[in-house]
Amino acid sequence: MKIFIPIKNNSQRVSRKNFRSFAGEPLYKHTLLKYSQFEVYVDTDSQEIADGILSDERLAHVSVYMRSSDLIGDEISVCRLIERFISKFNIQEPIVQLHVTSPFLSSETIKKAGKMIGEYDSVVACTKYNSRFWKIEGYGPCPVNHNPLKLEQTQDLPSLYEENSAFYIFRPEVVSQTNGRIGQNPYFFTMCHPENIDIDTEDDWNLVKSMEKVY
């Protein structure tokens, strides 16, 4: 497997989150250092990140390249970046796409999830919930996975699975077949706290920092 990590210079909701310090390293380096047993490819629009990788001898396993100008912008789908990566390096083997914003995700989890490729064409990191869910429609609240007139134990309710964005693993052809990272025969790999934390808000960052010493 080859690991593909897109890293932006700008963050919309958490200013400079990829550069913030975690466990004594910038967040992006903290992640890259964990995957020294893999070939890692970083697609970035940040010269600061590119220079930081190239100047750090600990990151010899990382190949970094600058994002093309037509693929820069918050509205650009990560799938377009993956397509360019596959084409640029003629990738034939399974790809692990992850972000640097899941600081508790371990390389052991990635290896374990990667073993599912073969029987399945893709693996989706997810969080499993057995709770009573509702959605709000135009006509009012609507139960999603339970009958309000029939009280059941939560463990007996249908499980719901949330993509937590920690990682996706897929064969290269999945992207061209589905225009996405999830194939026609996916495996939903459930993760627990704290590995499933993704830094998306300042509250997420504060939670991660509060757990830094424990980590």
Image: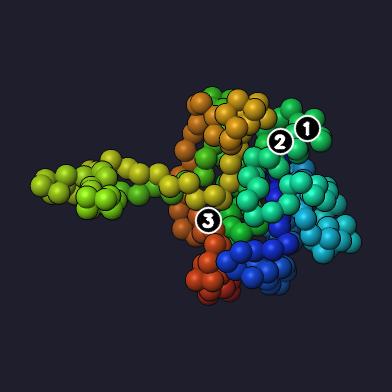
Report the side of 147 relative to 99 (left or right). Answer: left
Which residue carries the number 3 mark? 195
**Image disc number at residue 1:** none
Marks 1 and 2 in Cβ contact (< 8 Å): yes
Q: Which residue is drawn at 32% across and 42% down?
A: 159
**In this orientation, which residue lies closer to the viewer: 94 or 74?**
74
**C-alpha distance separating marks 3 and 2:** 27 Å
Q: Residue at x 57, y 66 (%)?
A: 13
The crowd level at tag 3 (other Cα within 10 Å; few <14, some 14-19, many 20+) is: some
Q: Is residue 104 depicted above or below 176 in this figure?
A: below
**Residue 61 appears in view:** no
Q: Three-letter amino acid code at disc 3?
A: Glu
Report the side of 156 relative to 161 (left or right). Answer: left
Query: Of discs 3 and 1, which sits in the foreground?
Result: 1
The crowd level at tag 1 (other Cα within 10 Å; few <14, some 14-19, many 20+) is: few
Say which element carries label 1.
helix
Report the side of 173 relative to 70 (left or right). Answer: left
**In this orientation, which residue lies closer to the viewer: 158 or 15?**
15
Q: Which residue is drawn at 58% across and 54% down?
A: 105
Residue 174 in picture, x, y percent from top left: 61, 28
Colouring method of the image: rainbow
Considering every residue shown, the one lying at the far front of the view is: 138
**Image disc number at residue 83:** 2
Residue 99 in picture, x, y percent from top left: 64, 53
Q: Three-letter amino acid code at disc 1?
A: Ser
Q: Residue at x 54, y 34 (%)?
A: 182
Marks 3 and 1 in Cβ contact (< 8 Å): no
Q: Is residue 103 depicted above or below 182 in this figure?
A: below
Q: Three-letter amino acid code at disc 2?
A: Glu
Which residue carries the number 1 mark? 87
Q: In which quarter of the image is the N terminus?
A: top right
